[in-house]
């Protein structure tokens, strides 16, 4: 997403750091108009790394970095995601208002009921189906729900790698969705510190 | 011989199907409304109801005595009711227990009833799932095949046989 091509590099910083353990955090790559990034690697999925190791590494690195850390996990149940979720102060779960996705959300909320979760409705059309809004309300219960991120079909065609919230000279569309993401970020910060 | 069996055991352990188990979080939710809390302790309630995930409300009329075989009065084929005392016959569960896949194929009307119950709870503002209801029913099962439980099974077989008798 950010334009990082693992094939262009000989090393895999994240894998190297995990193998080194908790003592040496990877150094984030700094790129203009993008968040500081520790890129993943395709080999990470093939590695049988226990979730506890991932959790320990992330906890130690976050302390070293001394800044908020966002871990973008692969969808589905796997040890990498489990490890990241275990150690998270807050798990932000994108919610798609559609039938199968809501079914999956119900299962996920049941499995992870002890976790601190923030539901983030994403790609929400201008007129979302009422039954899914009602269902989300029931599924969420006392789990906090952030303001929705609206569906932006133009983003699928977007070529620029700059983060929407960091894009210089943003147009009207980018300003609109950047405002929604900033609102979400504020909610994440509020719930993390709660 | 022992080495051969240990190698086979190792191979079997590698191919053994494991169940997914969700590890506890290192930063859990502050208002835990499950398991250990009673209704008066939970910080979060829904519409005045006690949290669904807590222990069942004391609604039974008398204690269960399935181990000694003493019959209960009158309830017949109704679902077993929890007791107000120390749940001596209940399985002990924790939030960290691994789960197993209880793949059960049931007749559609029974599944519809389960769905109706879930929706009824949710309409009252109580968050519940099919899994939780079934776990609760399993939790309430007698520890053995007491005479009363056999009577309930016989009544169920009469009312809802699984096979047609020729």
Image (cartoon, coloured by chain):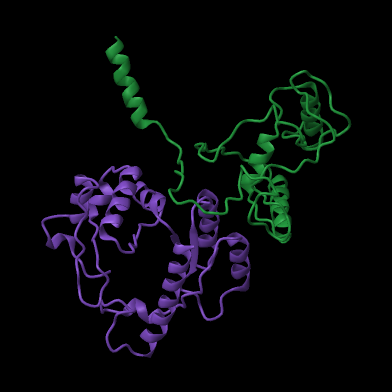
Chain colours: A purple, B green
Is residue A93 visible from the viewing direction of this image? no
Percent coordinates x, y for residue B76 in the rendering: 85, 33
Q: Tell me the quarter of the picture where residue A154 sits.
A: bottom left
Spot the residue most to the right.
B74
Q: Residue at x 75, y 43 (%)?
A: B57
Q: Residue at x 39, y 51 (%)?
A: A87
The residue closer to the viewer here, B98 or A179, is: A179
Q: Is residue A182 left or right of residue B80?
A: left
Percent coordinates x, y for residue B85 in the rendering: 75, 32
Is residue B120 visible from the viewing direction of this image? yes
Spot the residue most to the left.
A10
Q: Residue at x 30, y 55 (%)?
A: A63
Q: Residue at x 79, y 19 (%)?
A: B69
Percent coordinates x, y for residue A20 in the rendering: 19, 46
Q: Is residue A61 left or right of residue B141?
A: left
Q: Tell me the quarter of the picture where residue A41 sits.
A: bottom left
- Looking at the image, is A176 positioned above or below residue A112? below
Quadrant including the N terminus of chain A = bottom left
Q: Count every numbered label the image shows and give the total.
A: 0
The residue closer to the viewer here, B113 or B122, is: B122
Percent coordinates x, y for residue A116 in the rendering: 49, 56
Q: Is residue A118 left or right of residue A56?
A: right
Q: Is residue B110 left or right of residue A162?
A: right
- Looking at the image, is B106 positioned above or below residue B27? above
Q: Tell me the quarter of the picture where residue B162 sits.
A: top right
């Amino acid at each position: 997403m950010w334009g990082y091509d693992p094939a262009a590099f000989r090393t895999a910083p994240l894998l190297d750091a995990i193998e080194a353990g908790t003592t040496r955090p990877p150094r984030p790559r700094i790129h203009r108009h993008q968040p500081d990034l520790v890129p993943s690697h395709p080999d990470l999925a093939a590695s049988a790394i226990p979730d506890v190791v991932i959790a320990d590494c992330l906890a130690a690195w976050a302390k070293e970095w001394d800044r908020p850390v966002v871990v973008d996990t692969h969808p589905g149940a796997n040890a990498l995601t489990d490890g990241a979720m275990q150690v998270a102060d807050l798990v932000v779960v994108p919610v798609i208002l559609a039938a199968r996705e809501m079914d999956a959300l119900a299962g996920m909320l049941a499995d992870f009921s002890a976790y601190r979760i923030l539901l983030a409705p994403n790609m929400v059309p201008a007129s979302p189906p009422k039954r899914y809004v009602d269902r989300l309300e029931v599924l969420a219960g006392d789990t906090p729900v952030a303001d929705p991120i609206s569906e932006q079909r133009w983003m699928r065609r977007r070529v620029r790698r700059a983060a929407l919230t960091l894009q210089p000279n943003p147009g009207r569309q980018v300003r609109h969705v950047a405002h929604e993401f900033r609102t979400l970020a504020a909610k994440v910060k509020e719930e993390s510190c709660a | 011989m022992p080495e051969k069996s240990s190698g086979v055991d190792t191979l079997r352990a590698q191919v053994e199907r494991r169940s997914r188990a969700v590890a506890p979080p290192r930063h859990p939710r502050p208002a835990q409304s499950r398991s250990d809390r009673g209704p008066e302790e939970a910080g979060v309630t829904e519409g005045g109801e006690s949290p669904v995930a807590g222990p069942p409300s004391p609604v039974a009329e008398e204690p269960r005595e399935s181990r000694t075989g003493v019959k209960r009065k009158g309830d017949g084929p109704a679902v077993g009711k929890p007791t107000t005392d120390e749940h001596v016959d209940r399985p002990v569960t924790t939030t960290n227990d691994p789960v197993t896949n209880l793949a059960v194929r049931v007749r559609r009307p029974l599944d519809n009833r389960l769905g109706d119950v879930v929706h009824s709870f949710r309409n009252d503002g109580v968050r519940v799932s099919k899994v939780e209801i079934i776990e609760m029913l399993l939790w309430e099962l007698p520890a053995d095949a007491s005479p009363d439980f056999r009577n309930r099974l016989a009544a169920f077989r009469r009312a809802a046989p699984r096979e047609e008798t020729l």
